Image: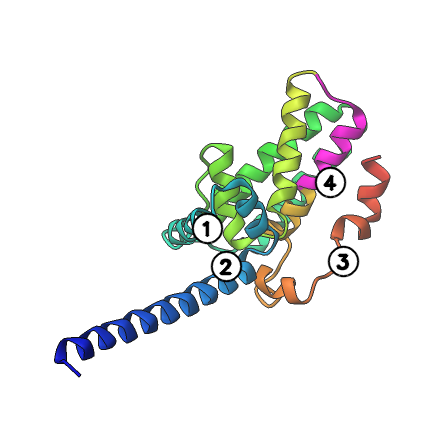
Amino acid sequence: MPSWVWVLIAIAVIVVLAVVVWQALARRRTGRLQQQFGPEYERTLENADSKRDAEAELQTREERRQQFEIRPLSQVARDRYLQSWKRVQTQFVDDPRSAVAGADSLLQSVMAERGYPVEDFDQRAADLSVDHPQVVENYRHGHRLAQASADGSDSTEDLRQAMRHYRALFDELVEPAADQPTPREQVDNPQPNTIDRDPSHERTVR
């Protein structure tokens, strides 16, 4: 057999092996991103032109997140924010619209103190999705309802739902101590939503 035939066979084998390795790496990347982002992976995939674009977007978020120095709140700061939330929650009874605006502002303050950049809303949500993929969609829903409130097209029920959505993110940003499960661990061992366990919240935000 001519030597050039062997060369072609060798090239074909190398190409096939390269494709197999590339596919294996792609599957591994997909699995890792699905585990990391959970429902946020599916949401990004639905809004992207292709799977490749969606996964590139999520990897970009991870790379950006690595540049931040995210720090836990001190106990003093945690207690301060919990008291502030209680005041906002109480305010809901008499002035739901202002309470929702206050909750939105309070969340931004917590994010900033934790070390997240507080830029435009879409960027904030994208940054949060890396560490808090299970509740970032709550934040988006709450923000949409808060915007409707600012535009005057709201209802008390919408505002109540906005507060509940905000509370889901607030609990993750403020409540967990260092020895509690991380958001990634909570994917495998989900805990009941603290909103439903908080009697004071249910009495106030109706």
Contact between labelled residues 1 and 3, with CB atoms less than 8 Å apart: no
Picture disc at residue 33 = 2
Which amino acid type is shown beneath numbered disc 3?
Pro
Total marks drawn?
4
Comparing 182 with 140, the one in front is 140
Q: Earlier in the sequence, mark 2 or mark 3?
A: 2
Which amino acid type is shown beneath numbered disc 1?
Leu
Contact between labelled residues 4 and 1, with CB atoms less than 8 Å apart: no
Rendered view: 91 above or below 54 = above
Q: Residues within 10 Å of mark 3 (few under 14, many from 20)?
A: few
Q: Is residue 160 magenta?
A: yes
Picture disc at residue 46 = none
* Residue highlighted by disc 4: 164
The CA distance from mark 2 to mark 4 is: 28 Å
Residue 91 visible in the displayed image? no
**SS state under label 3:** loop
**SS state under label 4:** helix
Rendered view: 77 above or below 140 = below
Residue 112 at what x, y percent from top left? Answer: 48, 42
Residue 50 at what x, y percent from top left? Answer: 47, 46
* Residue highlighted by disc 1: 58
The CA distance from mark 1 to mark 4 is: 26 Å
Q: Main secondary structure of the magenta part?
A: helix
Which amino acid type is shown beneath numbered disc 2?
Leu
Residue 138 at what x, y percent from top left? Answer: 65, 42
Residue range (magenta): 153-166
Q: Earlier in the sequence, mark 1 or mark 4?
A: 1
Query: In the figure, is residue 61 to the left or right of 98?
Result: left
* Residue highlighted by disc 3: 192
Residue 206 visible in the displayed image? yes
